[in-house]
Image: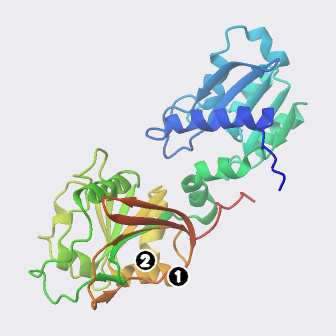
Amino acid sequence: MKTENYHLSSDELYMRRCLQLAQCGSNEAAPNPMVGAVVVCDGRIIGEGYHQRCGEAHAEVNAIASVKEMDLLQRSTLYVSLEPCAHYGKTPPCAQLIIDKKIPEVVVGCRDPFAQVNGKGIEMLRNAGITVREGVLEQECLELNRRFITFHTLHRPYITLKWAQSKDGFIDKVRTDEHEAPVRFSTPITQALAHQLRAENEAILVGYRTVMLDNPSLTTRAWYGKHPKRVVIDPQNALPSDRRIFDNQAPTYVFGSISEALTKLHTLQVQSLVVEGGAKTLGQFIEAGLWDEARIETAPILLHNGIPAPHIDGQTVSTLSIDGRDITILRHRATPQRPS
């Protein structure tokens, strides 16, 4: 059978560099998207930059500022992973800067779903006579900012469901009071990874029963990073004030329903949420189709009976074996929604 080697086009090569640069802003750019940009002249990168932190210069500004010979801009191509902005926010519009610098061609990875942009930046450039090409490595560019895109297209946080289970499919044994310890499926290593997931998300959510039986702190104590906002679904408003979630280590919100919680989190500009259970709460998210990603840790332990783990259908993204545990990542959608 004949096989063919796949070679990146020059457009894809430069856009790949944009994506590499964009990831450098993963810790500080939020709630803004991660964006990378490169300036190319005569087949050579003469400038590059990324959005370093919210409120500061965008990727295009940093890339253009890094060019040593400014006269080269007038015969260069600017590559950028996300559509240049067209509005005045904390910084001036990047589209206008591109126009002012007389850059003749711009290549865009994907459009920006933010209402004040969403095609307006591209339109502004084209109206100024600049050639704009779209969709280079579009899916990779959408994937990079899937949380930002979900927030602006679906008007809710990007939701990751997370739980640990036994090899025979139980999430815990049946417990009747808070003095009975839960089954521990995680090792110190996989627990640290679970806390890393917390640090990577802006909020964490559990149900009333989890708070009452486990009395969790829901912090990142086993990983470096900021504690997420803590959210509890408590339909009866019956949580006692002595629970650890009220220890002031992080903001805590109590809501009567999932819909109320998601509406408030959107108002608070929270773009990412990890749901850690319990089984009833996870099941409600799954039944409503309110999830984007799931992380399932399976331990080599047999319980034979207990509380069944949630049933979920999704596309397997990866399966890893870590410290004797299998961690499976699923996606509800194969790719983030393309901005309309």
Comparing marks 1 and 2, which lies closer to the viewer?
A: 1
Q: Is residue 245 left or right of residue 205?
A: left
Residue 198 location, x and y as percent?
A: 35, 56
The answer to whether one can see residue 92 in this image is no
Q: Is residue 143 left or right of residue 260?
A: right
Q: Secondary structure at mark 1?
A: loop
| Colour scheme employed for the rendering of this structure | rainbow
Residue 234 location, x and y as percent?
A: 30, 80
The residue furthest left is: 179
Cβ atoms at labels 1 and 2 below 8 Å apart: yes
Picture layout, residue 156 above or below residue 29? below
Which residue type carries mark 2? Answer: Ile
Q: Secondary structure at mark 2?
A: helix
Picture layout, residue 94 above or below residue 33? above
For the point 39% across and 66% down, the residue is: 326
Which residue type carries mark 1? Answer: Ala
The residue furthest front is: 1
Q: Which residue is mark 2?
A: 258
Q: Nearer the viewer, residue 261 or 90?
A: 261
For the point 42% across and 82% down, the residue is: 310
Q: Is residue 294 left or right of residue 221?
A: right
Label 1 crowd (10 A; few <14 / some 14-19 / many >=20): few
Quadrant of the image for the C terminus?
Answer: bottom right
Q: Nearer the viewer, residue 10 or 227?
A: 10
Q: Which of disc 2 and disc 1 is earlier in sequence?
A: 2
Residue 282 location, x and y as percent?
A: 40, 78
Q: Which residue is mark 1?
A: 288
Picture layout, residue 154 above or below residue 219? below
Residue 98 location, x and y as percent?
A: 76, 26
